[in-house]
Image (cartoon, grey):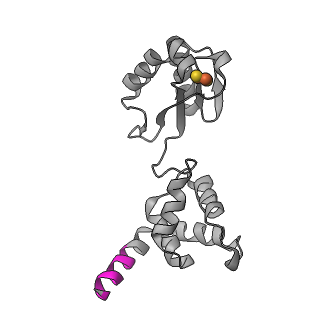
Amino acid sequence: MEADKLNRNREIFQKISPNDKKEIKVILKSFEKDNINIISILQKIQERYRYIPPHFIFYLSKKLNIPPAEIYSVATFYTQFRFNEIGKYEIVCCDGTACHVKGIRPMITFLEKILGITPGETTEDKMFSLESVACLGCCAISPVCIINGKIYGNLTTNKIRLLLKRIAKEDNE
Ligand code: FES
């Protein structure tokens, strides 16, 4: 049993690259040892990696001497944390009532078709992630999508097509 545990711990530590270990060390160093704030640590990790690599939970658990389940339950309680790697471009489409009425659905279908993914997924080349969410709070300019934090309103399928074209062009420059 003890040997199993040791092997598991070894596997977890091996999964973390030396670089990631260094990054986590820097993040942890910025917090007082007896004032450990799991939320802030997770926020810093997500800021750096754009998601929480699930195996980091075990590494943090070992480093902070906190059970993985405790860290995991904090991370899953807050919707701000994600465990899947997202693409370089994150497209979040509003599927709320106003956007729905103004025709966001065919646009989401268009994105699904052109990117080959459904909401919640990331393209294999890690370029695009697609999400659909409830009202983004800017119904006056519906239908709305947010790409890497920038709001695009009054969208049409053609506008989305042009946006993707522009992103691809700028990304190649
Ligand atoms: S329903 Fe889409 S922004 Fe409100």
Task: Answer above or below: position of 162 versus 117.
Answer: above
Which of the 4 image quarters holds residue 155?
A: top right
Query: Which quadrant of the rendered structure holds the N terminus?
Result: bottom left
Which of the 4 image quarters holds residue 122?
A: top left
Task: Answer above or below: position of 144 versus 2.
Answer: above
Q: Which residue is most to the bottom?
A: 2
- Ligand 1 falls in which quarter? top right
Start-end of magenta stretch: 2-11
* Residue 80 drawn in magenta: no
Task: Answer above or below: position of 9 versus 163.
Answer: below
Foreground of the two, 97 or 83: 97
Taking the image as shown, residue 125 lies to the left or right of residue 144, namely left
Which secondary structure type mostly characterizes the magenta part of the structure? Answer: helix
Task: From the top left corner, tell me how far across and down residue 114 is, in percent.
Answer: 40, 23
Residue lying at 32% horizontally and 88% vertically, measured from the top left: 2
Task: Answer above or below: position of 12 versus 117.
Answer: below
Task: From the top left corner, tell me how far across and down residue 127 is, in percent.
Answer: 47, 38
Query: Which quadrant of the rendered structure holds the C terminus?
Result: top right
Residue lying at 55% horizontally and 51% vertically, measured from the top left: 81
Task: From the top left corner, tell me how far across and down residue 162 is, in percent.
Answer: 54, 16
Count of residue discs: 0
Foreground of the two, 65 or 15: 65
Taking the image as shown, residue 153 lies to the left or right of residue 161, namely right
Foreground of the two, 98 or 104: 98
Residue lying at 48% horizontally and 34% vertically, measured from the top left: 131
